[in-house]
Image (cartoon, rainbow, N blue to C red):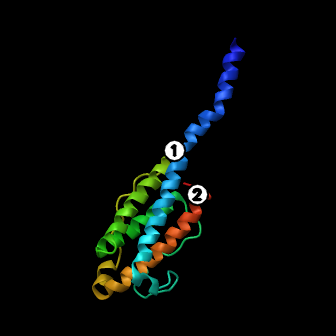
Amino acid sequence: MHCGLLCRFLWLWPFLFYIEAMPIRKVQDDTKILIKTIVTRINDISHTQSVSSKQKVTGLDFIPRLHTALTLSKMDQTLAIYQQILTTLSSRNVIQISNDLENLRDLLHLLASFRSCPFPRASSPKTLKGLGDVLETSFYSTEVVALSRLQGFLQDMLQQLDFSPGC
């Protein structure tokens, strides 16, 4: 009698793990789709193709560059910086991308909670040093470089998500 109950439980065990894994897979898939959507939005802005994400532009050092080892928390911190830059730009080209970045950060927090990562919601980053001065003198260049680097960062993020990045 006890063996029957134990056997039924053991038989159900793989299904219980499958049920638990589905939301994680769904959130990860939604995250990848949103990343691809943002990259497509950036591609649709024609003037972003004129600058390489690896090109060094004087005065724009506060815009994050590509990273090799991305953790979920590093992804969130970098996205927060990009979101602050895009919000400050507030051109019609980047408003939706900025909103998408907020949604992407929410998905990263959800992935972190599924993995039991200690992932506190970061307060908005400190005002970026030099952002105001640069915007006054080179608004267009700042937008182009920020979007170009963001695109490269998102493509790296997309690849890292396939390898289940750490906390």
Image position of 92 (left or right of 39): left
Q: Name the residue under label 2.
A: 165
**Mark-to-mark CA distance, 2 and 1:** 17 Å
- Corner quadrant of residue 20: top right
State the image coordinates of residue 88 (x, y, percent, origin top left): 30, 73
- Corner quadrant of residue 67: bottom right
What residue is at 34 percent from the left and 62 percent from the top?
124
- Corner quadrant of residue 99: bottom left
For the C terminus, the quadrant is bottom right
State the image coordinates of residue 11 (x, y, percent, origin top left): 68, 27
Image position of 15 (left or right of 63): right
What residue is at 55 percent from the left and 49 percent from the top?
25
Q: In this view, does 1 lie above or below 83?
A: above
State the image coordinates of residue 92 (x, y, percent, origin top left): 29, 74
Residue 23 tag number? 1
For the N terminus, the quadrant is top right
The answer to whether residue 142 shows anywhere in this view is: yes
Three-letter amino acid code at the position of disc 1? Pro
The answer to whether residue 63 shows anywhere in this view is: no
- Among numbered discs 2 and 1, the one appearing first in the sequence: 1
Characterize the local packing of mark 1: few (<14), some (14-19) or many (20 or more) Cα atoms within 10 angstroms: some
Characterize the local packing of mark 2: few (<14), some (14-19) or many (20 or more) Cα atoms within 10 angstroms: some
Residue at disc 2, secondary structure: loop
What residue is at 52 percent from the left and 53 percent from the top?
28
As rendered, which of 60 and 158 lies closer to the eye? 158
Three-letter amino acid code at the position of disc 2? Pro
Residue at disc 1, secondary structure: helix
Q: Is residue 32 above or below residue 3?
A: below
State the image coordinates of residue 165 (x, y, percent, origin top left): 58, 57
